[in-house]
Amino acid sequence: MPYEWLPATPTETRLHLWPYRSLPKTGFVWFIGGTATLLLVPLLAVLGSPVLWGLLPFLLLALAAVWFALNRSYRDGEIVEHLTLTPDRITLTRHGPRGRRQDWQANPYWVRLDLHRTGGPVPNYLTLQGGDRQVELGAFLAEDERLALLGELNAALRRCRSPER
């Protein structure tokens, strides 16, 4: 799953979430290389003729567009969320694309974890409500992953609130 509970200390529990990547960086390199090869195959028929110079810029432009689109997708998917639970504070830090950072803090005793089965931007939308502010958690996760996270996070919140901690 694209989230993990980091080793807990006696006073702190930490959760790290990130979006799933279906194409790793090595796959990106192979895909660009394969695309370049397939785009160059039609040039074999016109090798040595002036038509080659007419087609080459368009094929290189197509390859550059594919590279740019995949690279942009990677940059937009650089979302990481860090959730830290302590007995007196729950903190959610979201590092978004292009260096954007958002922080949220609340008292864990008053935090409510909500699962919106419908009506959210995604099915089984998971939110944390603390004070007057509601924040999303793991919107990039799959439906079943958000459901699994709901149970695990409820248990972590109960442990955080318990007085014998």
Image (tube, rainbow, N blue to C red):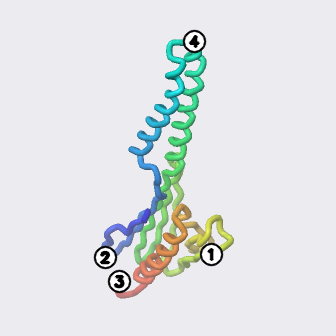
Element under disc 3:
loop
Q: Nearer the viewer, mark 4 or mark 2?
A: 4
Question: Could you classify mark 1 by the number of other residues whose Cα lies within 10 Å: few (under 14), some (14-19), or many (20 or more)?
Answer: few
**Residue nearest the viewer, comparing 19 with 55:** 55
Q: Secondary structure at mark 2?
A: loop
Location of residue 92 in the rendering, given as x and y in whole percent from the top left corner:
49, 65
Q: Element type at marker 4? A: loop
Q: Is residue 139 above or below residue 113?
A: above
Residue situated in front as seen by the camera: 31 or 118? 31
Q: Residue at x 49, y 81 (%)?
A: 109
Query: In the image, 163: left or right of 149?
Result: left
Compared with residue 146, is residue 37 higher up or lower down, i.e. above or below? above
Q: Which residue is mark 1?
A: 117
Choose the circle earlier in sequence order: 1 or 4.
Answer: 4
Of marks 1 and 2, the one in the foreground: 1
What residue is disc 4 on?
A: 50
The residue under label 3 is: 165
Along the polypeptide, which appears first: circle 2 or circle 3? 2
Marks 2 and 1: in contact by CB < 8 Å?
Answer: no
Q: Residue furthest right?
A: 119
